[in-house]
């Protein structure tokens, strides 16, 4: 399962960079204009590459102690990988329509769904190993990105800015889960 996840994440990250295009034969002012135009593509690439890398790390952490993969874990993993492999598409939509509901709305929905499925996988694997459900960090990323879909309806920029909240909320969720693991 880890090898398949490694392959899917590597391919998804590779597909992201293929979306960045710069016309050939430009120089001077034309080249500067073209570079200005690809800035949003580079920004979306960096965002999605970091998201995919964090998903990869979280997936490895979730399944590292799995003693076996039952059918439920298998299908959760497949759903997670389908969503990860889909990330280049909403990234492109975000590049093209970041100022409209569709861009951040679709991106937030896909990233939020992937985070939620990964949480389900982590929870299932942990419970199968006899761990307390409280020892699994709550899915802060899922909550933030899914909430951003609603925010995007009113302000696409506010939705994009709201994604930053996933960082401190994830740290908080990790600390709460760590405390739960320390308790007998």
Image (cartoon, rainbow, N blue to C red):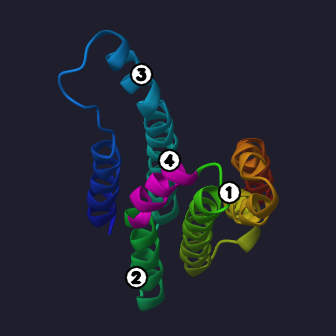
Residue wearing tag 2? 74
Residue wearing tag 1? 141
How far apart, in angstroms, are the residues tagged by discs 3 and 2? 47 Å
| Label ID, residue 33 | 3
Q: Secondary structure at mark 3?
A: helix
| Label ID, residue 95 | 4
How far apart, in angstroms, are the residues tagged by discs 1 and 4? 21 Å
What residue is drawn where x is 33% and y is 39%?
20
Chain part drawn in magenta: 86-97
Which of pointers 1 and 2 indicates the residue nearer the eye? 1
Q: Secondary structure at mark 1?
A: helix
Which of pointers 3 and 4 indicates the residue nearer the eye? 3
Q: Position of residue 183 (x, y in %)?
A: 80, 59
Q: Quadrant of the C terminus?
A: bottom right
User: Could you tell me if the residues under marks 4 and 2 are in contact, i.e. CB atoms within 8 Å?
Assistant: no
Q: Quadrant of residue 32?
A: top left
The mark nearer the N terminus, 3 or 2, is 3
The mark nearer the N terminus, 3 or 4, is 3
Q: Quadrant of residue 60?
A: bottom left
Of residues 163 and 9, the one nearer the viewer is 163
The mark nearer the N terminus, 3 or 1, is 3
Q: Position of residue 136 (x, y in %)?
A: 68, 64
- Left-right relation of 165 to 9: right
The mark nearer the N terminus, 4 or 2, is 2
Above or below, comparing residue 119 to residue 18 in the picture:
below
């Amino acid at each position: 399962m880890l090898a398949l996840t490694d392959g899917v994440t590597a391919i998804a990250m590779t597909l992201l960079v293929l979306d960045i295009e710069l016309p050939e034969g430009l120089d001077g002012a034309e080249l500067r204009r073209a570079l200005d135009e690809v800035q949003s593509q580079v920004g979306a690439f960096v965002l999605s590459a970091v998201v995919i890398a964090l998903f990869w790390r979280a997936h490895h952490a979730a399944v590292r102690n799995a003693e076996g993969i039952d059918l439920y874990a298998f299908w959760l993993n497949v759903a997670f990988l389908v969503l990860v492999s889909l990330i280049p598409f909403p990234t492109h939509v975000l590049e093209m329509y970041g100022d409209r509901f569709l861009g951040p709305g679709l991106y937030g929905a896909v990233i939020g769904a992937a985070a939620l499925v990964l949480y389900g996988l982590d929870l299932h694997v942990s419970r199968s190993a006899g761990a307390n459900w409280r020892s699994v960090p709550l899915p802060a990323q899922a909550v933030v990105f899914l909430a951003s879909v609603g925010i995007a309806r009113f302000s696409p920029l506010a939705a994009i800015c709201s994604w930053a909240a996933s960082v401190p909320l994830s740290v908080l969720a990790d600390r709460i889960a760590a405390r739960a693991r320390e308790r007998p």
